[in-house]
Each structure stands twice: as C-alpha cells, then as structure tokens.
Amino acid sequence: MRVAVWYSNKDVRLEERPVPQIGPGELLVKVVASGICGSDVMEWYRRDRAPLVLGHEIAGEIVAAGEGVAKYQPGERITAAHHVPCQTCHYCRGGNPTVCETLRRTSFDPGGFAEYIRLPAINVDRGTFLLPDEISWEDATFAEPIACVLRGQRMASIRPGNSVLVIGSGIAGLLHVALAHALGAGRIVATDINQFRLEAAQRLGADSTFHAGEYVPDFLRQVNQGRLADRVIVCTGATSAITQALESVDRGGTILFFAPTDPGVTIPISINELFFREDRTLTTSYAGSPADYQTALDLIRAGTMPVHQMITHRLGLAETGIGFQLVASAQDSIKVIIEPQR
Ligand SMILES: [Zn+2]
Ligand SMILES: [Zn+2]
C-alpha cells in the first residue's frame, strides 16, 4: 500500500509498505479521509521520532475483522480514536482518562496518511464509532478535534451567557468559536494574525474579531460592556498570546490553555494578585475521551457544528506534503483533508 511518510514539514515522501496484518480483536480499515491537525505540523514535537506516518483524524471503511470481533463487520463506515484509555487505572476511574498512560501510548498502525490502517484490539473495543449515513467521510474526520474541544470547554466550565475570547483562530480556535456559539455563550471575540481566519471566525459565530498584532484588552472592553472576558481560550503557543490571555480574563474567570508553547516557555504569575483580587482559574486540556468522540459525532450529525464549511482543501495521498505546507504556512487554509484512496 501507499503511505505518506513525514520527515519534516517540507519533506513528506510517498513510500510503499505492506498492508498491516490483523490479529484477534483487530480491524483493518480502508482510510477514505484523513484530516491534517495543527499538531501534525508542530515540528519540534515530532522531529525526534521521524520518520513517522502521521494522521489521527480518520474516517474509513472496515475491510476485515479479526477473530472475536463481534461489534463490527466489513463494509461498515467508522471513525476511530487513536488514543484510548485503559479504563481501569487510578486516573481513568477518577474521571481523568486523558492523563492515562495507556492513552498516551495507544495509536493506529501505521497512521492515518496511509491507504489502510490496523486498529489494535483496545482501539476496537473502546475507540471505534459507527458513522451514521448522514455524516460524510470528510465531516467525520472532525470527530477527534471536536472531542478535544468539547473536553476543553468542559474544563473551562463555559456556561450560557459567558463572554468568551478565543486567541488564535486556526482550526482549533475556530472549532472553539463554533462550539461556544452552539452552547450558548454570550459575546464571542476572536483574534488571529490572519484576515482569512478572522472572517471564518465571524461566519462561525464570533461577534467581534481583532488582528492579534493590534489587539489590546481595551478592544475587548469596548465590545463587552466594559468588561474583560469570562473565559479566555488560548489556541496558539505564541508567548504574546499568553500575556494577552492573562490581561484579558475578568475577575473570577478562567483561562484555558489549549495549545502547547515552545519548549521551555514559562510564565510569571503573582499568587497574591490571584488570591486577593482576581480569583482566576488557569487550566489546560489535552485530548478527549471516548464519550467526547460520541458527543462530537452527535453534534456533527445534528448540524450543530458546521464543520463542512471549514474544509478548504482536499488532496490525494501523494499531495500530503502540499497539505503540510498549507497547514504550516497558515495562510488561506483552514482544514486540509487527505484522501488516501486517490
Ligand atoms: Zn487532531
Ligand atoms: Zn487509565
């Protein structure tokens, strides 16, 4: 089969590999659509492990089921989670499956930018989801990013009527705008350095948008009845964005850090300011749980998350490298979908 192998964002090679062999409890899936994630182009995070077959936002058709697989059959349309929790450790039992060690270790074989993938038994057991007919292949690739966004907004306790500032309007930021809008947030404000993305944020539910290079918290006050934001969601690792977030969250509010920074970045925080005056909550969110995947699919099916309008490019497997360039350069692309069967 053909696979797209990542060496760097500028060096993605089409190579031949054998179709994976499946064992008991496993599934062989023909990948029909595979989304490029913002994290796929984060070179410092991937470089040490290259060459890699990336791709964790997939939709495909089951072509073979291993011995003992009772729930799924060849011909069925699915999406799947690459990271799945053990469900038995201290963290899983305590309701924190995304810090489970099993979750960090599990993955597809070899990765979603390939004609076929093998789903290990643990992924089949708790991370495989049948697609309703109404959800297209490409829309189904949004299950994973929306699952992550759902968990993030749960961690940030976004409530109806909250004002929400989203800093960084790439695909993650735009999904946050759309979900906050769908869940009944009050005023939604988005920033980015790219005008194309700010326009997309407006279409998806942002009431006001600002160029990140010009943004100051007073802009927020001007459109938010004199107040800072109840919730701030940081979807970029830029250090300037962290400063903006700290300056833009209202007293009693919450900042959700939804993207990593470059390695080694730290922020100075005054505990006394937080203690005596501000009572702000800082939190992070990484990945989503199996339950979040199911909710994500329900939202896609219901049309609550208008994912289709976020797809800007559809490319064949041999063009995966072009896709990585589009996502890494962050110009006029939002979601880039690879179609490994062409
Ligand atoms: Zn992703
Ligand atoms: Zn666990």
Image (cartoon, rainbow, N blue to C red):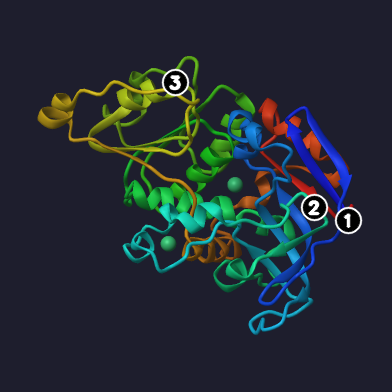
Earlier-in-chain disc, 3 versus 2 = 2
Earlier-in-chain disc, 3 versus 1 = 1
Q: Type of residue at label 3?
A: Thr
Q: Secondary structure at mark 1?
A: loop
Asked if residue 240 lies left or right of residue 81, the reply is: left
Is 154 in front, or is 205? 154
Q: Type of residue at label 2?
A: Ala
Asked if residue 102 lies left or right of residue 34, the reply is: left
Is 227 in front, or is 336? 336
Is 134 in front, or is 50? 50
Q: Residue 95: x percent and y percent? A: 34, 62
Asked if residue 213 lies left or right of residue 141, the reply is: left
Dots 3 and 1: beta carbons under 8 Å?
no
Dividing the picture into quadrants, the one containing residue 311 is: top right
Q: Secondary structure at mark 2?
A: loop
Identify the residue position indicated by label 1 in the image. 1
Query: Which residue is depicted at the point 54% across and 70% down?
Result: 126
Q: Residue furthest top?
A: 214
Q: Type of residue at label 1?
A: Met
Note whether residue 292 is visible: yes
Q: Residues within 10 Å of mark 1 (few under 14, many from 20)?
A: few
The label shown at residue 114 is 2
Q: Residues within 10 Å of mark 3 (few under 14, many from 20)?
A: some
Q: Residue 328: x percent and y percent? A: 68, 29
Establish whether ligand 1 lies closer than 8 Å to the Cβ of label 1. Answer: no
Q: Residue 76: x percent and y percent? A: 74, 75
Dots 1 and 2: beta carbons under 8 Å?
yes
Dots 3 and 2: beta carbons under 8 Å?
no
Measure the alpha-carbon separation of dots 3 and 1: 42 Å
The label shown at residue 239 is 3
Indicate whether 90 appears above or below 235. Answer: below
Query: Which residue is depicted at the point 46% across and 46% down?
Result: 286
